[in-house]
Amino acid sequence: YLSLYEAEEANDGQQVLLTVVAQEHAKKSAELEKEVARLLEAKVAFEFHAAKDKAEALGNMQQSMEAALADKVSKLEHSEHHLQLKSDQNDHLKEDLKEKIALLAQREARLLEFFKAQEENKEVIADLQEKLELR
Protein backbone atom coordinates (compact mmCIF):
# COMPACT_ATOMS: atom_id res chain seq x y z
CA TYR A 1 0.00 0.00 0.00
CA LEU A 2 2.72 2.38 0.87
CA SER A 3 4.30 2.30 -2.56
CA LEU A 4 0.85 2.62 -4.17
CA TYR A 5 0.13 5.55 -1.89
CA GLU A 6 3.49 7.14 -2.72
CA ALA A 7 2.85 6.58 -6.44
CA GLU A 8 -0.57 8.22 -6.14
CA GLU A 9 0.98 11.13 -4.22
CA ALA A 10 3.67 11.51 -6.89
CA ASN A 11 1.00 11.30 -9.57
CA ASP A 12 -1.08 13.94 -7.75
CA GLY A 13 2.03 16.15 -7.47
CA GLN A 14 2.73 15.75 -11.16
CA GLN A 15 -0.89 16.60 -11.98
CA VAL A 16 -0.70 19.72 -9.79
CA LEU A 17 2.58 20.65 -11.44
CA LEU A 18 1.10 20.04 -14.92
CA THR A 19 -1.96 22.10 -13.98
CA VAL A 20 0.26 24.97 -12.77
CA VAL A 21 2.40 24.73 -15.93
CA ALA A 22 -0.76 24.62 -18.08
CA GLN A 23 -2.20 27.65 -16.25
CA GLU A 24 1.06 29.57 -16.69
CA HIS A 25 1.15 28.56 -20.34
CA ALA A 26 -2.47 29.70 -20.80
CA LYS A 27 -1.68 32.96 -19.01
CA LYS A 28 1.41 33.56 -21.21
CA SER A 29 -0.60 32.63 -24.32
CA ALA A 30 -3.32 35.13 -23.36
CA GLU A 31 -0.69 37.81 -22.71
CA LEU A 32 0.97 37.06 -26.07
CA GLU A 33 -2.39 37.22 -27.84
CA LYS A 34 -3.07 40.60 -26.19
CA GLU A 35 0.41 41.81 -27.23
CA VAL A 36 -0.16 40.59 -30.81
CA ALA A 37 -3.54 42.34 -30.87
CA ARG A 38 -1.96 45.54 -29.48
CA LEU A 39 0.84 45.36 -32.09
CA LEU A 40 -1.66 44.73 -34.90
CA GLU A 41 -3.71 47.69 -33.70
CA ALA A 42 -0.56 49.85 -33.59
CA LYS A 43 0.38 48.64 -37.09
CA VAL A 44 -3.08 49.49 -38.45
CA ALA A 45 -2.96 52.91 -36.77
CA PHE A 46 0.53 53.55 -38.17
CA GLU A 47 -0.53 52.48 -41.68
CA PHE A 48 -3.67 54.62 -41.39
CA HIS A 49 -1.65 57.68 -40.37
CA ALA A 50 0.93 56.98 -43.08
CA ALA A 51 -1.83 56.71 -45.70
CA LYS A 52 -3.47 59.87 -44.34
CA ASP A 53 -0.13 61.74 -44.45
CA LYS A 54 0.51 60.48 -47.98
CA ALA A 55 -2.96 61.56 -49.11
CA GLU A 56 -2.42 64.96 -47.51
CA ALA A 57 0.99 65.31 -49.18
CA LEU A 58 -0.53 64.32 -52.54
CA GLY A 59 -3.31 66.84 -52.01
CA ASN A 60 -0.78 69.56 -51.22
CA MET A 61 1.29 68.58 -54.24
CA GLN A 62 -1.83 68.69 -56.43
CA GLN A 63 -2.72 72.15 -55.10
CA SER A 64 0.84 73.33 -55.69
CA MET A 65 0.84 71.93 -59.22
CA GLU A 66 -2.56 73.48 -59.94
CA ALA A 67 -1.32 76.85 -58.65
CA ALA A 68 1.83 76.58 -60.77
CA LEU A 69 -0.24 75.61 -63.80
CA ALA A 70 -2.64 78.52 -63.22
CA ASP A 71 0.35 80.85 -62.96
CA LYS A 72 1.81 79.52 -66.21
CA VAL A 73 -1.57 79.82 -67.95
CA SER A 74 -1.87 83.39 -66.68
CA LYS A 75 1.63 84.24 -67.92
CA LEU A 76 0.87 82.60 -71.27
CA GLU A 77 -2.36 84.57 -71.60
CA HIS A 78 -0.47 87.76 -70.71
CA SER A 79 2.19 86.92 -73.32
CA GLU A 80 -0.48 86.22 -75.92
CA HIS A 81 -2.18 89.54 -75.09
CA HIS A 82 1.18 91.33 -75.30
CA LEU A 83 1.92 89.68 -78.66
CA GLN A 84 -1.53 90.66 -79.92
CA LEU A 85 -0.91 94.26 -78.87
CA LYS A 86 2.47 94.22 -80.62
CA SER A 87 0.87 92.69 -83.70
CA ASP A 88 -1.85 95.35 -83.67
CA GLN A 89 0.81 98.07 -83.27
CA ASN A 90 2.78 96.52 -86.10
CA ASP A 91 -0.32 96.47 -88.31
CA HIS A 92 -1.00 100.11 -87.41
CA LEU A 93 2.60 101.06 -88.22
CA LYS A 94 2.32 99.23 -91.56
CA GLU A 95 -0.83 101.19 -92.39
CA ASP A 96 0.85 104.46 -91.39
CA LEU A 97 3.86 103.57 -93.53
CA LYS A 98 1.63 102.75 -96.51
CA GLU A 99 -0.17 106.10 -96.08
CA LYS A 100 3.16 107.96 -95.87
CA ILE A 101 4.48 106.14 -98.95
CA ALA A 102 1.29 107.07 -100.82
CA LEU A 103 1.69 110.74 -99.74
CA LEU A 104 5.34 110.70 -100.84
CA ALA A 105 4.31 109.23 -104.20
CA GLN A 106 1.74 112.03 -104.59
CA ARG A 107 4.33 114.67 -103.67
CA GLU A 108 6.83 113.12 -106.06
CA ALA A 109 4.23 113.22 -108.84
CA ARG A 110 3.45 116.88 -108.06
CA LEU A 111 7.18 117.71 -107.96
CA LEU A 112 7.66 116.00 -111.32
CA GLU A 113 4.74 118.02 -112.71
CA PHE A 114 6.23 121.17 -111.19
CA PHE A 115 9.67 120.46 -112.68
CA LYS A 116 8.10 119.64 -116.03
CA ALA A 117 6.09 122.87 -115.89
CA GLN A 118 9.25 124.74 -114.88
CA GLU A 119 11.14 123.29 -117.86
CA GLU A 120 8.27 124.29 -120.13
CA ASN A 121 8.29 127.78 -118.61
CA LYS A 122 12.06 128.01 -119.21
CA GLU A 123 11.50 127.08 -122.82
CA VAL A 124 8.72 129.67 -123.16
CA ILE A 125 10.92 132.31 -121.50
CA ALA A 126 13.82 131.40 -123.76
CA ASP A 127 11.53 131.67 -126.83
CA LEU A 128 10.23 135.00 -125.61
CA GLN A 129 13.74 136.30 -124.99
CA GLU A 130 14.75 135.21 -128.46
CA LYS A 131 11.77 136.99 -129.98
CA LEU A 132 12.55 140.09 -127.96
CA GLU A 133 16.13 140.08 -129.09
CA LEU A 134 15.10 139.71 -132.68
CA ARG A 135 13.05 142.80 -132.52
Image (tube, helix red, strand yellow):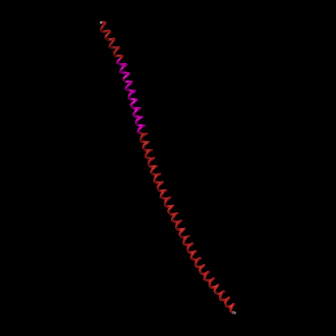
Tally of marks? 0
Report the magenta residues as a range: 89-118
Residue with the most extreme top position: 135
Assign the magenta stretch its main secondary structure: helix
User: Which residue is at 62% across, 83% downward?
Assistant: 17
**Residue 78 in the image: x percent, y percent?**
43, 46
**Which residue is at the front of the view, 117 or 9?**
9
- 23 relative to 79, above or below: below
- Residue at 63% x, 86% y is 13
At x 30%, y 9%, the residue is 132
Q: Is residue 67 left or right of residue 16?
A: left
Quadrant containing the N terminus in the rendered view? bottom right
Provide residue 95's location: percent of width, then percent of height.
41, 34
Looking at the image, residue 40 sits to the left or right of residue 3; the answer is: left
Point out the image quarter for the C terminus. Answer: top left
Q: Name the image quarter holding residue 113.
A: top left
Please give the name of the residue rendered at 51% of the width and 65% of the height, measured from the top-left corner.
49
Q: Please, is residue 71 above or below residue 46 in the view?
A: above
> Which residue sits furthest front?
3
Q: Nearer the viewer, residue 57 or 121?
A: 57
Q: Nearer the viewer, residue 53 or 17?
A: 17
What x and y, as percent, mark residue 72? Answer: 46, 49
Magenta stretch: includes residue 108: yes
Query: Residue 108 in the image: x percent, y percent?
Result: 38, 25
Q: Is residue 55 magenta?
A: no
Residue extending farthest to the bottom is 1
